[in-house]
Image (tube, helix red, strand yellow):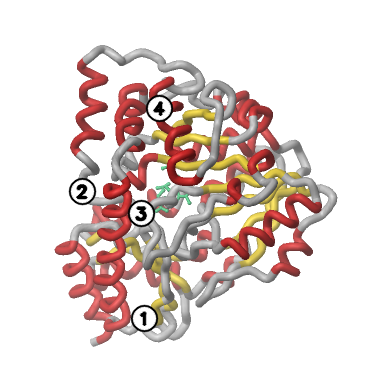
């Protein structure tokens, strides 16, 4: 009963459709090139050196140290590798562990919609209740009074995703401060999903909420190696925070997978230690892909919203489809012109808010984006 209505994820449905119709898949967010050779070789080396049994429950020490060093190097945050860092099966399991470990039946979680699809499902599994605050285009900011109104005596935590999937919104320091102030005022935990932390454009900085004054000890920060190192299939994620929050997440996590991906943990540890120039290069390359896709979407007739980070850009389809039915549009698109996208309504609890919005991924090779753009021009004709 808890999972009534969750069905099959849209990513599975749309990637299967892409395969069946031989379409260009700009739906599910995954890159179509490999990440750095050093990262791949480190994992291969780990397999060849016999590191093929269960890693420790918290994750391999080499990776926990690399995560702590990364938080220190990029954000000036200090975490104890034995009590404040936990390796997980992707950010998805970090989210699941944190939500299952921290929430009791009837607790409320304040979050923003649109939202990554696993949030609602994990909150439901925990027997808790999601209370969405809607972000609206083009700026996708939030109304602080709406946020305040969503908080009740039952609220246990606020869940924040920045850089944001699917909108590409990057919350700035002032917006994060508003969230932090409410968390302090109501004594709430904040869970941050920062998987796109290095994928920000136009010189914008990603600000982890944990760096705001007084916030470090009420924030559980989640990230993953999948996006930064083009290794989404490896499913190596992590969370960092004060010991009591990490312990709660760990207690649930140990009964989900217990552990995963030993050799891949070595690979991601190598990645996290790469030079600054690598991280800048990843963002610059994606920014160029964004700037290649967006004019093509405009030429195809869509109203295209700005995106400051992530793999994704959102469009309003109403100029090319007057009824604004994004779900129907995405189910037809592969048959009409051989391109797959994701209907944003699946990211909303108030589905009508996202009915006319569609997400395209630009984490693809230039020639693949060119091909998609060329195919999409059939819509304008
Ligand atoms: N959060 C967001 C916002 C995401 O887009 C993703 C990507 N799939 C995840 C979490 C899950 O990351 P992972 O693949 O590391 O589980
Ligand atoms: N995070 C990716 C996206 O939003 C895919 C995740 C998944 O397939 N579950 O496209």
* Image mark for residue 138: none
Which secondary structure, mark 2?
loop
Q: Is residue 331 above or below residue 196?
A: below
* Image mark for residue 63: 4
Q: Mark 1 highlights which residue? A: 302
**Residue 104 in picture, x, y percent from top left:** 75, 36
Mark 4–mark 3 Cα distance, whole angstroms, equals: 27 Å
Between circles 2 and 4, the one closer to the viewer is 4
Residue at position x 45%, y 32% in the image? 89
Crowding near the residue tagged with mark 1, few <14, some 14–19, many ≥20 C-alpha atoms within 10 Å = many
* Image mark for residue 33: 2
Q: Earlier in the sequence, mark 3 or mark 2?
A: 3
Which secondary structure, mark 4?
helix
Q: Earlier in the sequence, mark 3 or mark 1?
A: 3
**Residues at marks 3 and 2 touching, judged by CB atoms closer than 8 Å:** no
Crowding near the residue tagged with mark 4, few <14, some 14–19, many ≥20 C-alpha atoms within 10 Å = many
Residue at position x 43%, y 38% in the image? 70
Query: Hey, which quadrant is residue 147 in on the image?
Result: bottom right
Mark 3–mark 2 Cα distance, whole angstroms, equals: 15 Å
Mark 4–mark 1 Cα distance, whole angstroms, equals: 43 Å
Q: Mark 3 highlights which residue? A: 28
Q: Is mark 3 within 8 Å of ligand 2?
A: yes
Q: Earlier in the sequence, mark 2 or mark 4?
A: 2
């Amino acid at each position: 009963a808890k999972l009534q209505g969750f069905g099959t994820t849209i990513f599975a449905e749309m990637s299967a459709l892409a395969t069946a119709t031989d379409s260009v898949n700009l739906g599910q967010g995954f890159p179509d090139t490999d990440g750095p050779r050093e990262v791949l070789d480190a994992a291969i080396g780990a397999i060849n050196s016999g590191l093929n049994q269960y890693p420790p429950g918290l994750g391999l020490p080499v990776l926990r140290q690399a995560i702590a060093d990364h938080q220190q190097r990029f954000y000036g945050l200090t975490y104890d590798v034995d009590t404040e860092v936990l390796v997980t099966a992707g950010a998805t399991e970090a989210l699941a562990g944190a939500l299952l470990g921290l929430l009791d039946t009837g607790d409320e979680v304040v979050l923003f919609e649109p939202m990554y699809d696993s949030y609602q499902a994990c909150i439901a599994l925990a027997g808790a209740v999601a209370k969405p605050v809607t972000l609206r285009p083009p700026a996708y900011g939030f109304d602080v009074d709406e946020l305040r109104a969503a908080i009740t005596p039952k609220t246990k935590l606020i869940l924040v995703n920045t850089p944001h999937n699917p909108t590409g919104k990057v919350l700035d320091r002032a917006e994060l401060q508003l969230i932090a102030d409410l968390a302090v005022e109501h004594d709430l935990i904040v869970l941050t999903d920062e998987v796109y932390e290095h994928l920000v454009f136009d010189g914008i900085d990603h600000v982890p909420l944990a760096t705001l004054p007084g916030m470090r000890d009420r924030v559980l920060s989640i990230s993953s190696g999948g996006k930064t190192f083009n290794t989404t299939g490896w499913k190596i994620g992590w969370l960092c925070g004060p010991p009591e929050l990490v312990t709660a997440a760990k207690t649930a996590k140990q009964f989900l997978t217990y552990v995963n991906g030993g050799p891949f943990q070595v690979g991601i540890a190598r990645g996290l230690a790469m030079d600054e120039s690598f991280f800048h290069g990843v963002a610059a390359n994606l920014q160029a892909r964004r700037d290649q896709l967006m004019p093509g979407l405009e030429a195809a007739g869509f109203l295209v919203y700005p995106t400051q980070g992530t793999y994704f850009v959102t469009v309003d389809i109403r100029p090319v489809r007057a009824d604004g039915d994004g779900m129907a549009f995405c189910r037809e698109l592969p048959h009409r012109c051989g391109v797959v996208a994701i209907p944003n309504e699946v990211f909303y609890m108030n589905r009508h808010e996202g009915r006319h919005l569609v997400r395209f991924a630009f984490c693809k090779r230039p020639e693949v984006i060119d091909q998609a753009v060329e195919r999409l021009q059939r819509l304008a004709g």
